[in-house]
Image: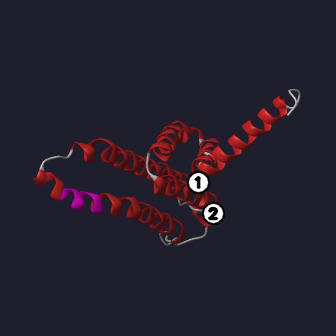
Amino acid sequence: MSTWLLPFVWLVNGLLALVWLLVEHLWQVGLAGALGYAVLRAPVSQQRWTLGAALLALLAGLLAPFPVALFLLVMTLAGLLAVRLERFNPQNTHWMLVRGLGLYALTGLGFAAYREWLLPALSDPALVQGQAYLNAIASIALYLLPLGYLALLAQGLLVHPPVQQDADEIIYHFRSRGKP
């Protein structure tokens, strides 16, 4: 191969390596984009909290084992969809998104720390027997927390307190202080 083709081969090789890296970490890349959108679309009063939860979720998506990044992505997309569809109280739904992401990110980081530091340190036979029990509890938590979050989102979207009047009558009633 001639030497003048080498820079192009290196460039193509670098681009292929970058594509491979993006495909290998597809869930994390999608999570970063969804979290960035969530931070940009957050109400001004909630942007700091959303940014903090987003950074925590991104850290958990990078450090925790496989299902955490996928579930964080699903939770983020479902929360963004719920905020967009909500007509009654979208700010409350956004807070639910931030709370859910923060809680699940902490769960994912805790699970990663448990697998990385606690499991290798268990050498006592009495503790090793309880290891299967702890693994079961941690694994169940990783799968049940997102389902509970999605159920709360559905409840927030579909179940609202009954309103006695339509919106215009309620606004008129409050502005006029009940006087005709």
Q: Position of residue 127 (x, y in %)?
A: 15, 52
Q: CA distance from mark 2 to mark 1?
A: 27 Å
Q: Position of residue 148 (x, y in %)?
A: 41, 65
At 51% from the left edge and 54% from the top edge, which residue is drawn? 72
Q: Could you tell me if the residues under marks 2 and 1 are in contact, i.e. CB atoms within 8 Å?
A: no
Q: Residue 175 has which mark? A: 1
* Circle nearer the viewer, 2 or 1: 2
The quarter holding residue 157 reads: bottom right
**Label 1 Cα crowd, 10 Å radius (few <14 / some 14-19 / many 20+):** few
Judged from the image, the secondary structure of the residue bearing numbered disc 1 is helix
State the residue in front, 53 or 33.
Answer: 33
The quarter holding residue 47 reads: top right
Relative horizontal placement of residue 51, taking residue 145 as reference (left or right): right
State the residue in front, 115 or 8.
Answer: 8
At 34% from the left edge and 43% from the top edge, which residue is drawn? 116
Q: How many marks?
A: 2
Residue 24 in the image: above or below residue 82: above
Q: What amino acid is labelled 2 in the image?
A: Leu
State the residue in front, 40 or 136.
Answer: 136
Residue 167 in the image: above or below residue 55: below
Relative horizontal placement of residue 54, taking residue 37 as reference (left or right): left
At 29% from the left edge and 41% from the top edge, which residue is drawn? 117
The C terminus lies in quadrant:
bottom right
Q: Position of residue 132 (x, y in %)?
A: 23, 61
Range drawn in magenta: 130-136
Residue 132 counted in the magenta span: yes
